[in-house]
Image (spheres, rainbow, N blue to C red):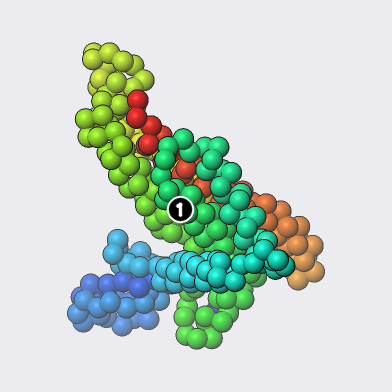
Amino acid sequence: MAADTPVEYIKHHLTNLTYGKLPAGYERADGTVVEEATWTMARTGQEALDMGFMAIHVDTMGWSVAVGLLFLGLFGYVGKRATTDTPSGLQNFVEMTIEFIQNIVRDVFHGRNPIIAPLALTMFVWILMMNTLKLVPVDYIPSIAHAMGLEYFKIVPTTDPNGTFGIAIGIFFLILFYSFKVKGPGGFAKELSFTPFNHWSLVPFNLVLELLALIIKPLSLALRLFGNMYAGEVIFILIALLPFWIQWTLNVPWAIFHLLVITLQAFIFTTLAVVYLSAAHEDH
C-alpha cells in the first residue's frame, strides 16, 4: 500500500473500491487483456473510471449499509429496554437526540405527516454516524484492506459524491411525491407557473426560475455535505504525510474541530431537507 510519492499517496486514499464491468479487449494495468466483457474489481483509478456509470463503489455501499444497520440496532435495543426508573446513559443520549429532532420538525415543518419526524431522525443520525467515521486514522482501514488483498478502501461514505447524491435524490423524489399528492398535478403546475410573478405573460420566466430552484435543492444538499467532508478528509491525509511528531500536534486539534463540523453538516442537511418537505406540503 506504500506510495512512492505524496501525490500517489493522496490519490490512493481518495480512490474508492470499485466493482464494475470492463469491456472485451480492455488492457489492464498489469498488461493482461480482458478477453470478454467481465465484472471485476478495479485495480487502478483509471480502471474504475473506464468502468463507467454502472460501476459500484463497494466501500461506500458497504459502510453506508453497516452504519445504517448499527443505527437501527442501537435505537431498537434502547427502545425495547427503555425504562423510566433508572435510564442508562445510552437511553438518555437517544432520548436527547429524539427530542432534538422533534424540536427541529416542530419549528420547521408546518404540515401534517407522521413520516417526517422519523425520516428526519434517520437522516440526522445516519449522516452523523457516517461523518464520524472520518475520525478513524486515515491509514488504519486501508492497511487492513490491503492485508486482505484490496488495493483501495475508503471508509467515509459522505466523502463520496455518489453517497451524498444518493441521499439527496431520495429527498428530491419525496419532495416531488408530496408536491403532487398535497397540491395535485394542477396545483403543483400552477405553483411553478405563477410563482413568484402572478401573471400569465411571465409564466415562461416563472417556470425557468422555479424548475431551477427545484433542481438546485438536491444539488445543494449533496454538494454541501460532500464538499465539507471531502475537504476535511484531504486535510487529514495531508497531515498524515508530515513527520510523526508534527502529526499529533495538528491531528488532535483538527479532529476536535471536526467534531463540530460532522455534527453541523448532519444538522444542516436534516434541517434543509425538512424545510424543502415542508414547502412541498404547503397548499396555497
The residue located at (55%, 76%) in the rendering is: 142
The residue lying furthest to the bottom in this view is: 148
Q: Label 1 sits on what residue type?
A: Leu
The residue located at (72%, 67%) in the rendering is: 86
The residue lying furthest to the front in this view is: 85
Circle 1 residues within 10 Å: few <14, some 14–19, many ≥20:
some
* Mark 1, residue position: 119
The residue located at (57%, 76%) in the rendering is: 141
* Residue 247 picture location, percent across and down: 74, 66
In the depicted structure, whether residue 31 falls above or below residue 13: below
Q: Which one is in front, 256 or 193? A: 193
In the depicted structure, whether residue 163 falls above or below residue 151: above
Badge 1 element: helix
Q: Quadrant of the N terminus?
A: bottom right
**Residue 230 horizontal side relative to residue 204, left or right:** right
**Residue 242 horizontal side relative to residue 222, left or right:** right
Q: Which one is in front, 272 or 135? A: 272
Q: Which one is in front, 72 or 8? A: 72
In the depicted structure, whether residue 94 falls above or below residue 116: below
**Quarter where residue 176 is shown:** top left
Q: How many marks?
A: 1
* Residue 78 picture location, percent across and down: 59, 68
**Quarter where residue 194 is shown:** top left
Q: Which one is in front, 130 or 50? A: 130
* Residue 169 picture location, percent across and down: 37, 50
Q: In this orientation, does residue 6 appear?
A: no
The residue located at (54%, 62%) in the rendering is: 130
* Residue 4 picture location, percent across and down: 57, 74
Q: In this orientation, does residue 88 appear?
A: yes
Q: Quadrant of the C terminus?
A: top left
